[in-house]
Image: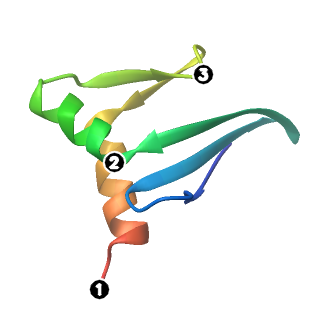
């Protein structure tokens, strides 16, 4: 399970991973880095060296959850 919350600075998000209810790792995700990956045509990125995440779907999720008007 991934918990995504707004990060300490604008355009950043704090992503924490839990497995079976146990906190595994934290990761600071920058929106600009996602846009750069999308521009370069990268479809999938690795998070925590264990999970693969679709870049386009993650951008869509962040837009829908945090940037919706």
Q: Which element carries disc 3, helix, strand or loop?
A: loop
Q: Nearer the viewer, residue 22 or 30?
A: 30
User: Picture coordinates of residue 47 (x, y %)?
Assistant: 52, 25
Q: Earlier in the sequence, mark 1 or mark 2?
A: 2
Q: For the point 32% across and 77% down, which residue is it?
A: 68
| Mark 2 lies on residue | 31
The quadrant in which residue 56 appears is top left
Q: x%, y% of residue 57?
A: 32, 44
Distance from Cα at disc 1 to Cα at disc 3? 31 Å
In the figure, residue 64 lies in which quadrant?
bottom left
Q: Find the distance from the CA under tag 1 to the CA under tag 2.
A: 18 Å
Tell which of 9 and 39 is nearer to you.
Answer: 9
Q: Residue drawn at (56%, 58%), measured in percent from left and top?
A: 8
Taking the spot 32% from the left edge, 23% from the top edge, the residue there is: 44
Query: Residue at label 1?
Result: 69
Of the residues under marks 1 and 3, which one precedes in the sequence?
3
Quadrant of res 39: top left
Dots 1, 2 in contact, CB < 8 A: no
Q: Work out whether mark 3 precedes mark 2 in sequence or the reverse, and give the earlier one.
A: 2
């Amino acid at each position: 399970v991934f918990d995504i919350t707004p990060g300490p600075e604008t355009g950043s998000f704090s992503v924490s991973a839990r497995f079976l209810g146990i906190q595994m790792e934290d990761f600071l995700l920058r929106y600009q880095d996602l846009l750069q990956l999308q521009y370069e045509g990268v479809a999938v990125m690795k998070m925590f060296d264990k999970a693969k995440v679709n870049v386009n779907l993650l951008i869509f999720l962040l837009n829908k959850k945090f940037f919706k008007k």
